[in-house]
Image: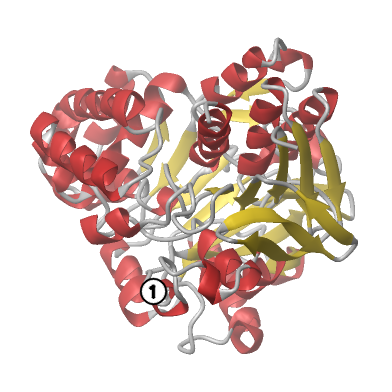
Amino acid sequence: MRNKAVIIGAGFGGLSCAIELAIRGFQVTVLERQSSVGGKLQRVVIDGYRFDRGPTTIEMAHVFRNLFRRAGRDLNDYVRLIPLEPRSRSVFADGSVVDLTGDVEFMQHQIGTYSPEDALHYPAFIRESRQMLRYASEHVLNRLPLSNLDKWWRGIFRGLLIPELHHSLNRQLRRHFSHPNTLAMFGRYAARVGSSPFKVSSLCGMLASCEADQGIYTVQGGTYQLIEAMKQLAEELGAQIKTGVEVTRIQVVDHHVRGIETTEGDYESPLVIVNGDALSLSKRLLDEKDRPSMPDRLISTFEPSLSAFVQLAGVPARLDRLHHHTVFFSDNYEGEFHDIFAHRRPPSHPSVYICNSSYSEEEAAPPGCSNLFIMTHTPYLSADWDWEQKAEAYSRTVISTLRQHGLSDLVQGHVLARYTPSDLARDTYSYKGGMFGITSHSCKQELRRPDNRSRDVKGLWYAGGTTHPGGGVPFVTLSGQLVAGYIARG
C-alpha cells in the first residue's frame, strides 16, 4: 500500500499531482466533489454561448508542455494552444489604449502617446522583470520550502541577491513610471495573485516578462480543454478519477494518515494530497486536535485573497473593439484596492476585465454574436457586503461602467448568468470566497503560508493556491508537480 495515494480535488494542482505520481508508479485515486473536474475552472454553455467560468488566461505554457513531456507525450496531440497577438488590450479612462506585445519598441510607441517619459523607461522595467523571473525560476518555482528555516533562508537570500524584492510592486513600478495609466497597467499583476500592488512584493513584476517574452495563450475549444487533456493523460497513466464524490473526513491515527471518509465510502491510503484551499479544508476535514500547528484561531488570522464578481453575457453583435482579453481601467486604481481590502466592498467605479473568446474563435458564440466573460475584482466574503441582496444592483453598476467606456451594444438583458464570491465559496470551499487562497501582502503572512507538507500528520500534503508557490494557473500546476516529486523521493 506504500505507493498508493488519494488526491482530494481535481483542479490544475490535483491533476498535475496525479500525473506526476502516476508517472512514478503510484496507484492514484482522484476524488472531486463537483460533477466535473476542473476546480474553479468549469465549462458553461448557455443558449449557444460557450464560456470558461474561471481562469481564461494561459501563461508559462512550458509548464504544461513539460508536464506532458515527462509522461512521454506531446501536449499538441491533446490540445492546441494558440498564442495571442496582441496579448491583451488595456483601455484607460482618458481614452488611451495599449495593446500588450513582446515588441519593446512598439510598447514604447504606445506608452509614449500619453507619457514619453514612461516610454523611455519601459526597456529598463522589462530587463528588471526578466531578472526577477530568472530568480523565481531558479530559487522559488522549482522547490518547496518545507520548514520555517527554508522560508527564512529564502527570504534572506532573496534580499541579498535582489534587494528590491522587499519593496512593494507599486514602489518598484514608481522607480520606472509616473503616469497613472502605466502604473495601473502593470500594477494589475498583483490582482493576478489575489493581492494589492501597494502591498504585494515586487517579485510579482516578473509577470510582465512572462507576458511579453513567453506570450499569452488561448486554448482551441476553450481553456477547459486543457483540463480535459490533463484528465485524459492522468487516466491513460492509470489514475482513477471520480466526480460527484465528497470527502467528509481525513482519517488520522497516531499522527499518520490512514485514509479518508467520503459520501460513497472509505478509502484506505497512507498518502493523501489535498488539492484545494488548505485553510478551509483543514477545518472541514481534520479534527482540530489533529492539527495543532493550524488551529482554528490561527486560520482566522490569515488575510484571504481578493475575489471576483463574474457575469456571462451573450451579445447579438460582433464586438471587435474587444480583443480576446481587454481591461477597462478606472480613473482611480489605488482607490479600488482601498475599497477591496480596507472597506471590504466592491469598487463603485471598478476596472473591468472582459474575455471575448469569440474574437479568436467564432465557434464560441452563435454566428454574428459575442460571448463575454465579464469580471470585476471584489473583496473576500465578510459581513460588510451581502451578495444575495446586492448582486443585481452591482451587476447594473458594472454594465453601466462598460457602456460609459463605449460598449453601447451591451445591455443588462444580455447577462445570462452571474457568479459571486458566495458561489465560489459554496462550490470550491475557497477560504471566505478568496479566488487565490491568501494574499501575499507581508513577509509575516508569507512565512506563515500553510506548508505543502503537514507538520502534524505524516502522509498528508497540500497542493494549491493557498500553499507554495501561490495562486494562478501555472503556479498551482507547479504546486501539484512539486508535491508529487517530493513524495516520490520519500
Q: Quadrant of the N terminus?
A: top right
Q: Residue 80, percent across and down?
A: 72, 20
Q: Using the image as rendered, state which of residue 416 and residue 262 is in the foreground.
A: 262
Q: Circle 1 is placed at which residue position?
A: 298
Q: Residue 160, percent across and down?
A: 9, 33
What colouring does the structure picture have?
secondary structure
Q: Using the image as rendered, state which of residue 78 and residue 44 is in the foreground.
A: 78
Q: Note whether residue 217 is visible.
A: yes
Residue at 69% x, 35% y is 2
Residue 248 picture quarter? bottom right
Q: Using the image as rendered, state which of residue 443 and residue 57 is in the foreground.
A: 443
Callout 1 secondary element: helix
Q: Note whether residue 316 is visible.
A: no
Q: Residue 13, percent across and down?
A: 61, 41
Q: Amino acid at mark 1?
A: Leu
Residue 220 picture quarter? top right
Does 385 sit above or below residue 265? below
Does 14 sit above or below residue 290? above
- For this orientation, the residue located farthest to the front is 254
Crowdedness near tag 1: few (<14), some (14–19) or many (≥20) residues, C-alpha within 10 Å:
few
Residue at 75% x, 70% y is 413
Residue at 16% x, 25% y is 124
Q: Using the image as rendered, state which of residue 400 and residue 64 is in the foreground.
A: 64
Residue 19 picture quarter? top right
Does 125 sit above or below residue 327? above
Q: Residue 110, percent across and down?
A: 31, 31
461 left or right of 317 in image? left
Residue at 27% x, 45% y is 151
